[in-house]
Amino acid sequence: MIRFTKMHGAGNDYIYIDGITNRVPKDIEAFAKRFSDRHKGIGADGVVLILPSDVAHCRMRMFNADGSEGQMCGNAIRCVAKYTYEHILIHRTEMLLIETESGIKVLNLKVRDGKVESVTVDMGYASFDTQKLPMQAKQSEFVEQTIQDTHGDSFDFTAVSMGNPHIVTFLDEDIATLDLAAIGPDFENHPYFPERTNTEFINVLSENHFRMRVWERGSGETLACGTGACAAVAAAVKTGRTHLETEVQVDLLGGTLFITYHDDDKVTMRGEAEEVFSGSLDWEE
């Protein structure tokens, strides 16, 4: 039997498996594809493993709905923090260290009556270096440059790495009218991005209030993306739409995140995490 817990951060939902005290599927890619299916499985944006670590308090590995492994997810890591505290794996509220594929992240938990109300994550550094995304571009930075989709529509993007690749576009038109299912795959699989990319579409309501939709590589449109919200605010500072050390409210389809881009290029994210249900299932390797 595989024991699991369904959790979400701002609607970005994953199947969490405690690999510290329970069994983990060996073929995790096949498991993720099978049970992320929203009609024939549990339904999720992917699967997250909570594992022991030699360099931090625990380790997080995340797999997208298509079975591919991702480097980092800001919404998922908040849920990992909540799980470790409330299930008494690691009873720590300050300086919780979680190892990810994009480095060790530092988290602080706000707890009331034994329950985690919100989590603040040091998301690491934003980088505009195209080599770090990676991105096959001649420029060292790709800021408000045009990329065209296969339908002939053009968008001006800024490329940002948050340990995983993002391209961000700021639009005057209402992002609710965009057909992301039609245009999202074009940018995710554009030849510029050998490892594919995440794509964020932003309406700037004010310098400290954005609205966002996201197309995530390997998962399609999701209700939220923590690293995407961080990339959006970093890109907004880079292009003069907001300022350093300003906490920006980012409204996503699944909820709200609060992002600050600091003057040392670090980004912090504050938001909730919710446990939905737990269960167990048969899984034969």
Image: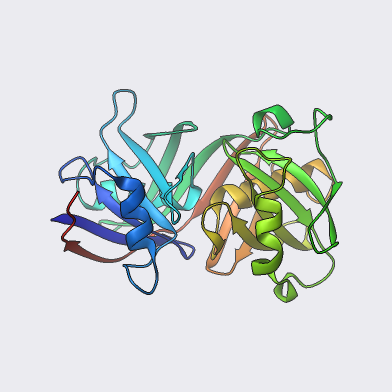
Q: Is residue 241 left or right of residue 222?
A: right
**Colour approach in the figure:** rainbow
Location of residue 98 (image quadrant): top left
Q: Is residue 214 left or right of residue 44?
A: right
Q: What percent of the width, then of the height, locates residue 26?
A: 24, 42
Q: Is residue 246 visible?
A: no
Residue at x 22%, y 64% (from the top left corner): 278
How many numbered marks appear? 0
Q: What percent of the width, then of the height, locates residue 250?
A: 64, 60
Closer-to-camera residue (22/11): 22
Q: Is residue 142 left or right of residue 131?
A: right
Residue at x 26%, y 50% (from the top left corner): 17
Query: Above or below — where is 185 with respect to 80?
Result: below
**The N terminus, quarter of image:** bottom left
Query: Above or below — where is 141 with respect to 241?
Result: above
Q: Is residue 86 visible?
A: yes
Query: Above or below — where is 26 with respect to 226?
Result: above
Closer-to-camera residue (133/237): 133
Residue at x 20%, y 48% (from the top left corner): 285
Q: What percent of the width, then of the height, locates residue 142?
A: 81, 38
Residue at x 80%, y 27% (from the top left corner): 140
Q: Is residue 112 left or right of residue 199?
A: left
Query: Above or below — where is 109 with respect to 15?
Result: above
Q: What percent of the width, then of the height, locates residue 265?
A: 67, 32
Closer-to-camera residue (284/178): 284
- Outermost residue toward the top in this view: 55
